[in-house]
Every structure is written in C-alpha cells, then in structure tokens.
Image (cartoon, rainbow, N blue to C red):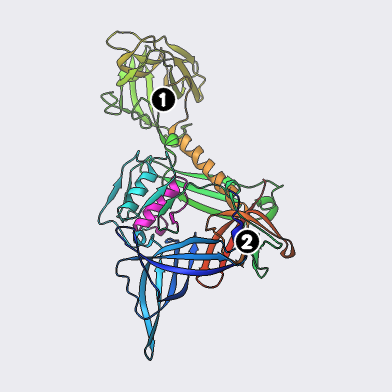
C-alpha cells in the first residue's frame, strides 16, 4: 500500500482521551484533565503494552477503558488525520497535592492484562484434534475480549491440560490464561497475542521478516523522519551453532539435533572452534507426523494373547511350533524393544491379528516388518485374510540371511472386505525367527514407523531453529516523529551517514509520547543469517 505522504510533513499534534465502556465497547465522554503520558509496546513482554498518563484533579474511570487519539493537522496543507493510539485499562495508584491543585500519574495497561491476571479455576482440558487457534480464541473470549484471528488448520495431536501443574519445570508451566493462549499460538506457528489500537486481540500467523510487507521506508534525506542520534548493536560472539529440540508426550520422547559444522559458515563449530548450544522443549508436533497408519494394534510390544485388535495382542496361526514375545536388544527399529519369536518344529507356524477392520476394493495394502532368523529358512507373508470367505491374497516368500532384513509386500483387494484378519507371518518349515515393528497399512508404500516420523520432524524443527539461531542480530534504537507503524511491522532503514543499510528490519519495541509531534522511540531488529 502506498505510504501516506501526510506523515512526511510537519504537523501539529493534539490528543483526545475518551472513555470506552468495558462491556459495550462504545465510546463515551472525553476527559479534559489528562495532560500527557506515554505508552510502550514490546513484543517480548506478555501483556504487550503498558505506560502511564499525567492528570490534574480527580481521575476515576470506574470500570471504563481509556482510548487515546492523536489529532494531527498538517502545518503545510491544513489536512488532518485521526489516529487511535491505544485502548487501555487505567489504574490510579498515586496522586499529590500542591495547595488546591491535585496532580497524579495513572498506570495504563493493554487489554491482554485481563488474560495475564486470570487463571483457570480447575483443570482445563483441550482434547486431541482441537484446532489450536480456535482453542486460544475461546480462552480469550471467555475474558470478554474481541479476537481477530488468521485462519489455521493446526490441531493438537495429544490432549493438553491447563490449570494444573504437571511439572515443576518453570519453562513449561502456564500460570495464566495468557500463557495458555500464547502456548497454543506458538504451537500453531503464530505470533504471540497482541492488540491493535482499539483493544482487539490479534492472532497473526508468523511470517518471516523478509516476507512481510514493507510498512515504512526510512531513508536519509529531506523526507526522513528519523533523527541521526541513534544507538546500534551487532554482536557475533554467541551465535548458535548447535540446536537440540526435546519432544515428549505420554507415549514417546525424542531429541532432534541440528549442527552447523560447515567450514564455510562463519559461525559453525569448525570456524569458531566451539559449540554454542540452544535447547527448545516442545510438547506438540504437527498431527501429520504423529499419526500412526498401522491397522495392527500393539505392534510395538507384540504381546501374545487373544489376538484381536481390540486387545492389542497377536495369536498363533497353524500348529507346528510356537510363538512367544521376546526382548530384542539388537532391534533395528528405534524405540522398539520387543518382538515375536516364531519357532518351527518342522512344519508351518506363524501369527496374525484378528478383527482389524475393513479393506476397500482397489486400495493397495502394504505389509512391512523387520525379521531375523535361521539362515536359509523360508518365510512367507500375507497382508490379510477374510475368515468369512476363507480367502486372501497370495503369499510373498523370502529366504532369511541370518541378519536383520526389512521386508515389504503390497497387495490390492479385489473387493470390499470387512472383519478381516491381518499381519500374517509364517516360518514354512524348520528354524526360528524374530519379527519386530510389523505394519499393515493402506497405501502402495510402507510409511515410516511413528517414532522415526517424529524423530525426523524433531530433527527438521531443530534445523529450522538452527537457521534462525545461526544469525547475528543487528539492533538500532532511534527516535522519529509519529508514523502509523507498530511492533512486528517490517520496513527499510537506510541511513548512509550512520553506515546503516538494512531492508526488512522489524520493529521490536515502540514507545509513544503524548506530546508535541508525538515522538516515537523505536528499536528495530534485523537477523543477518548465515547462508550456510
């Protein structure tokens, strides 16, 4: 959107302070006894914005909010603009008197304070499969806040519980509704909750700074509104070159790792001669990588029992030998330590699982497993069997090598079948074998074992965070006259006399003063990422 050139001209600034009904959101009377003040917005603080106002006489808003407007009129053209600067809760902790004149300072807070000061009365359960952003919206709206949210299809892959402490680790505790909201938003790939000038709570999807639209263009010259008295910082000492991501749930724990060991990277372990490690704890990964497509149940433990999917056990098929659950110390599948041992007394013996569900006509079914057994022994696989028809696909035969082998076989049902048995594995005659990590699933290929998929996702997340961490942060603190920009906005800063040339730098903090020209103190930040 083209920049409004009004803000490049000198202007006269007046301010209006207006009451706003907490429950209705409607504006009421103006307050004429407020003489000034300031507000600071900071993306790294929970409630996002807070400040103070100066007043004369009495100031009692009751439960009403305070909205601040800038009324700007151009000194060149006479044009005018009205800008809302924020909507706040007001606290009046102190006042002083000098004869008949009473003055005071009132603290003001953004609308997120309502969430920050509230907590759940008891366990607050959000079931697996719930949309994360919708869940965050529900919490915020329960505190009377209006929410404007970007669309999201991110859902929880496991049940989350707020309102009780399940761990003593401070970094994973959520001691307020705002902390719960921000944890949900972070997991969904969103920015932390923040507010617009009208007090609406914004849930915005995270966008890389270099992909955000340019909201300002501060270039040295006659139109530049930035003073050249500024502070800058650029520190390369603690650039991260190793990232660990810890993911844990009730069922699994994995550590994802990414290391910058590229000799061409200026911040790598090779170039610096030391490791600078960052660790992140995650409680949720995308549902797509945590879902298990296996139609067999209990495949990680492979217990012998009634042999139904409901029981999560396997049963013996044929009678020439025995099957038993065994500990497998050399299991080739990470996080799987138990398997089924099949021992033949000279004839055919195997195992399967009954009542696993239905199969669709024309939809390929793939059986996969790891097996190790007597060298030269003959093994057969059959993905399914339909007991009511006494029929199934043809067998796939493999000769064992004495080492671990990964076997995959695919068949396509010729009809729709219900109440099928599945996962048949047989020793044809003599010898013994151990089977681990068996899967039967719809599709023409074998998908990764769930632990492998989660491990790959954790490693990918670590690599993503390493790309973020493997960067130098350049910060510039400066003062400029008011411009309608805010925290998270991106733009260009080109000040040749200060040797600054940064595009898509982002505003991290913004402090507005309610006085002549409405000056802004802003900190802009840019990540200079290594290309490695």
The relative height of residue 415 versus residue 82 in the rendered view (above or below) is above
Residue wearing tag 2: 8
Pick the front one: 4 or 251: 4
Pick the front one: 351 or 427: 351
Helix, strand or loop for disc 2 = helix
The relative height of residue 425 versus residue 90 in the rendered view (above or below) is above
Pick the front one: 159 or 312: 159
The disc label shown at residue 313, or none: none
Range of residues picked out in magenta: 169-196
Quadrant (top left/top right/bottom left/bottom right) for the C terminus: top right
Report which quarter residue 278 is drawn in. bottom right
Residue wearing tag 1: 439
Badge count: 2
Task: State the image coordinates of residue 98 (x, y, percent, origin top left).
Answer: 40, 90
Mark 1 or mark 2: name the one nearer the start of the chain: 2
In the picture as drawn, the residue positioned furthest to the bottom comes out as 99
Pick the front one: 483 or 433: 483
Task: State the image coordinates of residue 74 (x, y, percent, origin top left).
Answer: 58, 65
- Magenta-span inclusion, residue 180: yes
């Amino acid at each position: 959107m083209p920049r409004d050139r009004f803000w490049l001209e000198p202007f006269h600034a007046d301010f209006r302070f207006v009451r706003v009904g907490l429950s209705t959101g409607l504006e009421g009377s103006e307050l004429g006894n407020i003489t000034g003040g300031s507000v600071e917005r900071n993306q790294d603080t929970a409630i996002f914005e807070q400040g103070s106002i100066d007043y004369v006489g009495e100031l009692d808003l009751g439960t009403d909010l305070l909205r601040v407007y800038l009324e700007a009129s151009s000194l060149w053209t006479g044009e005018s603009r009205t800008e809302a600067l924020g909507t706040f809760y007001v606290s009046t902790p102190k006042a002083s008197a000098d004869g008949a004149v009473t003055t005071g300072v009132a603290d003001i807070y953004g609308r997120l304070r309502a969430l920050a000061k509230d907590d759940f009365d008891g366990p607050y359960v959000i079931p697996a499969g719930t949309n994360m952003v919708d869940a965050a919206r529900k919490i915020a709206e329960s505190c009377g806040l209006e929410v404007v949210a970007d669309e999201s299809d991110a859902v929880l892959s496991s049940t989350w519980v707020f309102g009780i402490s399940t761990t003593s680790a401070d970094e994973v505790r959520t001691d307020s509704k705002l902390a719960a909201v921000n944890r949900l938003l972070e997991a969904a790939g969103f920015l932390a909750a923040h507010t617009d000038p009208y007090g609406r709570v914004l849930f915005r999807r995270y966008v890389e700074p270099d992909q955000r639209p340019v909201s300002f263009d501060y270039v040295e010259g006659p139109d530049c509104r930035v003073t050249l008295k500024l502070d800058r910082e650029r520190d390369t000492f603690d650039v991260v070159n190793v990232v660990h991501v810890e993911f844990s749930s009730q069922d699994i724990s994995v550590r994802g790792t990414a290391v910058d060991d590229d000799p061409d990277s200026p911040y790598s372990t090779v170039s610096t001669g030391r490791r600078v490690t960052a660790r992140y704890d995650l409680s949720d990964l995308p549902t797509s990588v945590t879902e298990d497509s296996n139609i067999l149940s209990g495949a990680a433990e492979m217990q012998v029992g009634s042999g139904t999917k409901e029981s999560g056990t396997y049963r013996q098929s044929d009678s020439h030998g025995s099957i038993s659950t065994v500990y497998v110390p050399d299991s080739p599948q990470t996080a799987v330590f138990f398997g089924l041992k099949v021992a033949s007394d000279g004839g055919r013996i195997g195992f399967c699982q009954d009542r696993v569900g239905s199969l669709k006509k024309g939809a390929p079914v793939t059986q996969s497993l790891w097996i190790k057994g007597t060298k030269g022994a003959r093994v057969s696989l059959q993905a399914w069997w339909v007991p009511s028809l006494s029929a199934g696909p043809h067998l796939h035969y493999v000769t064992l090598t004495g080492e671990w082998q990964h076997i995959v076989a695919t068949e396509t049902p010729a009809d729709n079948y219900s109440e099928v048995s599945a996962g048949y594995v047989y020793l044809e005659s003599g010898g013994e074998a151990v089977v681990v990590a068996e899967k039967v699933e719809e599709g023409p290929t074998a998908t990764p074992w769930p632990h492998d998929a989660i491990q790959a996702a954790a490693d990918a997340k670590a690599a993503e965070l390493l790309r973020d961490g493997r960067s130098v942060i350049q910060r510039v603190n400066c003062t400029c006259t008011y411009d309608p920009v805010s925290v998270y906005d991106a733009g260009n800063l080109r000040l040749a006399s200060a040797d600054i040339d940064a595009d898509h730098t982002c505003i991290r903090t913004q402090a507005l003063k309610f006085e002549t020209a409405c000056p802004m103190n802003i900190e802009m930040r840019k990540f200079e990422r290594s290309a490695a």
